[in-house]
């Protein structure tokens, strides 16, 4: 059962990132869309804002989908970890630790959510994608092929 833990974590992360990426790219669920995201990035001093907004939206959308499928899991989790570190640094660190759940006017959101996402992404990097993943299936197939080639080379066929 232990190999299903990383699977569950990976799929949950994938859903979160795909949803946030869709907000950045398409304005889904009240997100700013590409233009709103670019304006926010410009406000943070990130330049070129539109290119970075597009890259961030694509990384989160496709990264989320890749995590759900368990495809290129460790690379995807590493890319999203870097993105979350930048987000925590540029957008959330100055607001302290806590999320602004009370929606206090003028108060921004702290970095606690980024911290949890980073920890979860690093956990997926360390443990791998879990059993129900494309990566796990292709690794098993590669191992079987390697074992077959070894038998051929040794003459044990």
Image (cartoon, rainbow, N blue to C red):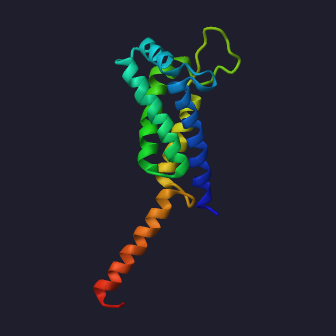
- Vertical comparison of 64 with 99: above or below: below
- Looking at the rendered image, the quarter that the C terminus falls into is bottom left
- Vertical comparison of 150 with 86: above or below: below
Q: What residue lies at 57% left-to-right and 53% top-to-bottom?
A: 6
Whether residue 95 sits left or right of residue 80 in the image: it is right
Q: Nearer the viewer, residue 141 or 7?
A: 141
- Residue found farthest to the right: 102
- Residue found farthest to the front: 26
Q: Quarter of the image holding residue 153? A: bottom left
Q: Nearer the viewer, residue 101 or 29?
A: 29
Whether residue 80 sits left or right of residue 12 in the image: it is left
- Vertical comparison of 135 with 97: above or below: below
- Residue found farthest to the bottom: 156
Q: What residue lies at 46% left-to-right and 13% top-to-bottom?
A: 39
Whether residue 137 sits left or right of residue 116 in the image: it is left
Q: Quarter of the image holding residue 90? A: top left
Q: Position of residue 123 (x, y in %)?
A: 52, 48
Q: How many marks?
A: 0
Q: What residue lies at 65% left-to-right and 19% top-to-bottom?
A: 100
Q: Position of residue 29 (x, y in %)?
A: 63, 25
Q: Position of residue 126 (x, y in %)?
A: 47, 52
- Looking at the rendered image, the quarter that the N terminus falls into is bottom right
Q: Position of residue 128 (x, y in %)?
A: 49, 55
- Vertical comparison of 156 with 24: above or below: below
Q: Quarter of the image holding residue 76? A: top left
Q: Nearer the viewer, residue 87 or 153?
A: 153
- Residue found farthest to the top: 106
């Amino acid at each position: 059962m232990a190999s299903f833990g990383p699977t569950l974590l990976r799929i949950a992360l994938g859903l979160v990132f795909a949803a946030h990426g869709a907000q950045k790219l398409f304005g889904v669920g009240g997100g700013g869309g590409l233009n709103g995201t670019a304006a926010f990035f410009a406000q943070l001093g990130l330049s070129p804002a539109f290119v970075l907004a597009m890259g961030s939206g694509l990384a989160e959308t496709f990264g989320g989908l890749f995590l759900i499928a368990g495809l290129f899991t460790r690379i995807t989790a590493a890319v999203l970890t870097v993105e979350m570190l930048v987000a925590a640094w540029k957008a959330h660190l100055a607001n302290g630790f806590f999320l602004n759940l009370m929606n206090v006017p003028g108060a921004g959101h702290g970095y606690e959510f980024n911290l949890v996402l980073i920890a979860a992404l690093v956990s997926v990097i360390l443990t791998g994608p879990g059993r129900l993943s494309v990566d796990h299936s292709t690794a098993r197939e590669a191992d079987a092929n390697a074992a077959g080639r070894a038998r051929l080379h040794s003459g044990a066929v």
